[in-house]
Amino acid sequence: MLETRGLRVVGDRVLVDGVDLTVAAGETVGLVGESGSGKSLTARALVGLLPRGLRAEGSVEVGGTQVVGASERLLRGVRGRRISLLMQDPFTMLNPLSTAGAHIAETLPGRTSRQEIARRLAEVGIDDPAVAGRHPFQLSGGMRQRVALAAALAGDPELLIADEPTTALDATTQHEILALLRRVQEARGMGVLLITHDLRVAFAVCDRVAVMYAGRVVEQGPGAELAAAPAHPYTSGLLGALPSVERAMERLVGIPGSVPRADEVAGVCAFATRCDLVAAACTEARPPLRPIGRDRLTACVHDAAGTARPPLAETASLTVPTAGPADGEPLLHVEGLRKRYGAHTALGGVSLHVNPGETVGLVGESGSGKTTLARSVLGLVTPDGGRIRLAGLDITDRAALDPRERARVHRLVQCVFQDPSTSLNPAMTVGAALAEASARAAPGDRIGVAELLELVGLPAAYAARRPKALSGGQRQRVAIARALAVRPALLICDEPVASLDVSVQAHVLELLRGIGRDLGTGMLFITHDLAVVRQIAARTVVLLKGAVVEEGTTSTVLDAPAHDYTRRLVSAVR
C-alpha cells in the first residue's frame, strides 16, 4: 500500500532526512518518537499536504502512484480515495458549521442517501442516525473522533494515516477507538500507519514499529520485540521513561537534552549527544539502518538487541507516594457540590478533600465532571449547590467574597493547564511573564525570576526567551513556574502532561513530585492516564457522570478496584 524510499522534507533546511518505510495491505505500522523527530511532517509528505515553503524529495508510492512531484490534480484523486489522513484533534478535520452527516457526504462519491450516511456512522460505532444532524460542538470528544474517522474512511481508502488519533482521549474511549480502528481495518484489508508518542499504544496494536529521531528512522521491527529488547539506545531511553501502571517508581527518568535538527547531525549518529553508550564510531559517520535479525533494523553501531536496555526497569520501587497529614482541617474540602448545564448534570453531589502537601488524583472519562469541579474550585464556575472550603475560607461563591478575600484566594490556588499556551502570553518574554505573576504574591513571599526558573530546572538565561522559542516541555515548566510564583497552597493540574512526549512527561512528573515533596504544596491532579496517576498521587478519586464512584489510596484503587467502572478503566490499560 505504501513504499517510501529516501524521503526528505526540505525548506530552508533539511527537516526529514532519508526515511524508508513500507506498509502492506492489512498491516498496521507504528511511527513513534519525540516531538521534533519529523513524524507529522512525514505524514503530511505522504499525502502531499506539506506547509507552504516545504517540499518533498525522494520516492513515495501509494498503491503504485508516485506522490512526490505529482500535480495537485493527481493528488486530489489520491487523497481520500487511496490514502486518507486522520488527525489528533477532530476539530482540525471537522468544520464547526457543518453537521456530522455533511462531513461524510462531501467525501462520498456521487449523490449520498441518508441510509448510506447512517451506514457509514454505524461502521464506526454510531448507531443513532440523529448524530448525522449534529454539529461537532454538540458531540463528546470520543464521538467527534468517531465522526472524523467515518469521514476519513468515506472514500474507502486503501491506506489510513492516523496521526495521534487517541492522545487526548480517556483510557476507555481510547481503547474503544483503537479496537474500532482494528475492526474496520480487518474488514477492509486496509493498511494503517499509526503515528503516536504513546509507546503502549504502538506496541499493543502495531504489527511493526519504526522509531524516528531527528528526521530519520533509527530502529524498526515487530512491536513486541522492540519492547522486550530494544537495539537502539534512543528506543531504550523512551521505554525507560515510560511510567508504570503496575507500580510507583522511585524516580522517573527522561532522556536528557532535546531532539537536534536533522541537518545539524546529518553526518553523525543523531543521538550521540544524548547517549550514554556513545563511542568514537558514533561521531565519525552516520550509522546506516542495518539488519540485526529477522525483520529487525537498527542505526546503532552496537551489535545485539537488548544491549541498550537501561537499568531503570530493574530499580523501579514499589513505594507508594506518601499521603499528607490527615489530622486537622483539610486544605481543600469539597462537600456535596452540584452543577447543572440545562438538562445535563455535570456534578451531582461530589465530595472530596485534599490535605496540605498531599496529591490527590482525579480520574474519569470525558464528561465525568473533572473539569467542572476544577473550574468550580478556581472560581471560574459558580456551583448550584454544595460547599467549597479552601484553607478554612468558604470560596463557594467568589462574588460574595470581599476584595481582600478574593486576592487571598487567588494566591492560595493556582492551575497548570494541559496546554501551556493558555497561561503564557506569546508577546511577553519568559522573564516578564514570571515577574508579572510574582508581583501578585504577598510582599514577603515574592520569588525572583531566576529562582523560579531554577525551581523548575531551567537556566536563568531562558528569561530572555519568548514561548515560541521553547519546546513543549520547556513551556510547561515555565507555566508551572508561573503558577508557583505566588506560593499557592493548592495547585490544580488539569492534564498537565497529556500532550507531552514520554521523556518530557517523565521530567515534568518528577518536577511536580518534587514540588509536592519539597514545597508542601497540595495538588489536585486531573488525568485520564492511570500510569501517571500511579506515579503522582497518594489517593485517587474516580468520577463517573458527575458522581464519585470510588476513592482510596492509589494502590488500592488500581490494584483492587471495587467499582465496575474503575475495573473497566484499569483493564483498558493492561
Image (cartoon, rainbow, N blue to C red):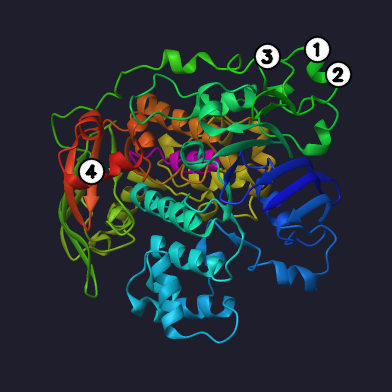
Residue 35 found in image quarter: top right
Q: Nearer the viewer, residue 348 or 161?
A: 161
State whether residue 392 appears in this view.
no
Real-space Cα separation, disc 4 to disc 2, in angstroms: 53 Å
Residue neighbourhood size for the residue with mark 4, other residues' Cα within 10 Å, grouped as few (<14), some (14–19), many (≥20): many
Q: Amino acid at mark 4?
A: Thr
Cα–Cα gap, marks 3 and 4:
42 Å
Position of residue 474 measured from the top left corner of the image (x, y, whole percent): 59, 39
The percent coordinates of residue 572 (x first, y second) are 33, 43
Q: Residue at x 29, y 39 (%)?
A: 570
**For the residue marked with disc 1, what is the amino acid?**
Ala
**What segment carries the magenta color?**
476-491
Looking at this view, is 423 or 498 the one in front? 498
Q: Which mark is residue 284?
A: 2
Residue at which label 3 appears: 277
Q: Residues within 10 Å of mark 2 (few under 14, many from 20)?
A: few
Q: Amino acid at mark 3?
A: Leu
Q: CA–CA distance between discs 4 and 1?
A: 51 Å
Q: Secondary structure at mark 2?
A: loop
Q: Is residue 475 above or below residue 553?
A: below
SS of the residue under disc 3: loop
Q: Residue at x 46, y 38 (%)?
A: 204
